[in-house]
């Protein structure tokens, strides 16, 4: 069972689940992401994620990456619109090595100019990779369409021009403004007693003073539905449609998560997959996604199909949206929808890295930690009336934005 949030002497938050397993996971989670960049800093959160491993005051880049890999461990990081994660997975006896290394990276990264210039080239190639993958690119472009003119619409990677312009001074300024300890949570799942882990974290993270951020995020509230058609050199038509949705603070996010999973989640038996792929054979991929942010959310549907089938596929999607708005789930339909989501959550928690990140994410935003059992109980309390209500609030097609990548003429 996960413990309550522990506060180190300097106020830094730590959440830990003691687990009898040979592999453990430890991470530093930061409440800072793409939406916290200024116009001049586009792509900076992601740039920090890449370059923070390029050397510290006592290690060069090779010694940083070798520190865990030399003992068979793994180290990684990720950036989203509102969060940046740094984490490592390792044999449980290597906890001291993992905690010390992440502390060194987090507090003592030097960001050498030569390494920064080299990493710019890497990120430019990453941008090229996404431009060559329309089924990936459309997700970023759809966010830009929905959140037009707002930081939430920025591409996480930045642009070729913004990456080339990045300077070390701007990077350090971004860190100083956003990487304050009140925006940080340490998260751990593994085989170490809580008291020993606290002592390690006090040693390596507890000596820095708590400095509170003065950052103010620009709220989002100016959504206007838009439709955009773009010609691409592709064989398929790629379509995304969706609407703004509930924030992480909204109680309606739980029934809406269940509804999204029922409509187009992980299972092959989702309503959209059954309609477009299994019954009609019109699409290889069709999915629905819901991402809650701190002040809004995003719901989207994606599918790829033959250009001649685009309008028919959109009609089938509209039909499924009407069904969930107009027809309440029966008792058994609701039971199995709940059971499927609960099962998927349980399977996700079997990957202890995912569990570590989920615990830290919850602590980062809510300053508390829910057990899996508490989350399951919340899902079981969802009613058909709640699902129908959120469907009618979010699935009004007049409120949908639509982005289409159509094959270029003659392609």
Image (cartoon, helix red, strand yellow):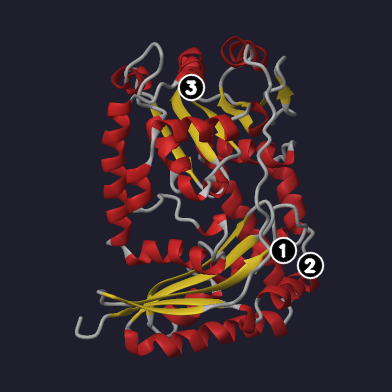
Indicate the quadrant containing the C terminus: top left, top right, bottom left or bottom right. bottom left
Q: Position of residue 26 (x, y in %)?
A: 53, 26
- Residue topped by disc 1: 255
* SS of the residue under disc 2: loop
Q: CA distance from mark 2 to mark 3?
A: 44 Å
Q: Relative to 356, say whether 9 is above or below.
A: above
> Closer to the camera, 74 or 56?
56
The answer to whether residue 103 is seen in the rendering is yes
Judge left or right: residue 91 versus residue 190: left
Is the C-beta separation of discs 2 and 1 under 8 Å? yes
- Residue topped by disc 2: 383
- Residue topped by disc 3: 102
Q: Position of residue 133 (x, y in %)?
A: 31, 62
Q: CA distance from mark 2 to mark 1?
A: 8 Å
* SS of the residue under disc 1: helix
Label 1: few (<14), some or many (≥20) within 10 Å?
many
Report the mark closest to the observer, 2 or 1.
1
Q: Relative to 249, say whether 4 is above or below.
A: above
Total marks drawn? 3
Is the C-beta separation of discs 3 and 1 under 8 Å? no
First-in-chain label (2 vs 3): 3
> Closer to the camera, 251 or 282?
251
Report the mark closest to the observer, 2 or 3.
3
């Amino acid at each position: 069972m996960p413990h309550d949030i522990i506060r180190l002497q300097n106020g830094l938050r730590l959440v830990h689940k003691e687990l009898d397993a040979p592999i453990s996971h430890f991470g530093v989670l930061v409440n800072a992401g793409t939406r916290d960049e200024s116009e001049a800093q586009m792509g900076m959160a992601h740039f920090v994620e890449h370059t923070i491993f390029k050397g510290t005051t006592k290690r060069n880049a090779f010694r940083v990456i070798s520190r865990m890999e030399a003992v068979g461990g793994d180290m990684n990081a990720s950036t989203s619109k509102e969060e940046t994660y740094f984490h490592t997975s390792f044999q449980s006896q290597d906890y001291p090595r993992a905690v010390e290394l992440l502390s060194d990276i987090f507090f003592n990264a030097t960001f050498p100019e030569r390494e920064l210039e080299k990493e710019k080239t890497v990120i430019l190639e990453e941008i090229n990779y996404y431009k060559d993958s329309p089924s990936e690119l459309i997700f970023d472009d759809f966010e830009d369409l929905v959140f037009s003119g707002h930081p939430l619409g920025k591409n996480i990677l930045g642009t070729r021009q913004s990456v080339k312009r990045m300077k070390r001074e701007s990077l350090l300024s971004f860190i100083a403004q956003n990487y304050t300890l009140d925006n940080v949570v340490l998260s751990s799942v593994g085989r170490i007693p809580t008291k020993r882990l606290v002592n390690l974290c006090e040693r390596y993270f507890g000596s820095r003073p708590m400095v509170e951020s003065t950052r103010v995020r620009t709220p989002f509230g100016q959504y206007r539905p838009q439709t955009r058609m773009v010609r691409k050199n592709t064989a398929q038509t790629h379509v995304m449609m969706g609407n703004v949705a509930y924030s992480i603070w909204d109680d309606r996010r739980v029934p809406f998560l269940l509804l999204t999973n029922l409509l187009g989640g992980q299972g092959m038996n989702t309503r959209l997959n059954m309609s477009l792929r299994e019954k009609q054979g019109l699409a290889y991929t069709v999915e629905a996604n819901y991402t809650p942010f701190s002040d809004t959310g995003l719901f989207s549907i994606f599918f790829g199909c033959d250009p001649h089938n685009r309008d028919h596929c959109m009609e089938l999607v509209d039909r499924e949206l009407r069904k969930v708005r107009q027809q309440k789930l029966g008792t058994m339909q609701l039971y199995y929808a709940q059971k499927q989501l609960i099962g998927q959550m349980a399977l996700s928690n079997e990957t202890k890295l995912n569990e570590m990140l989920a615990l830290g994410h919850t602590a980062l935003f809510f300053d508390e930690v829910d057990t899996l059992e508490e989350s399951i109980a919340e899902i079981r309390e969802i009613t058909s009336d709640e699902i129908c209500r959120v469907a009618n609030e979010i699935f009004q097609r007049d409120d949908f934005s639509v982005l289409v990548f159509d094959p270029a003429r003659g392609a």
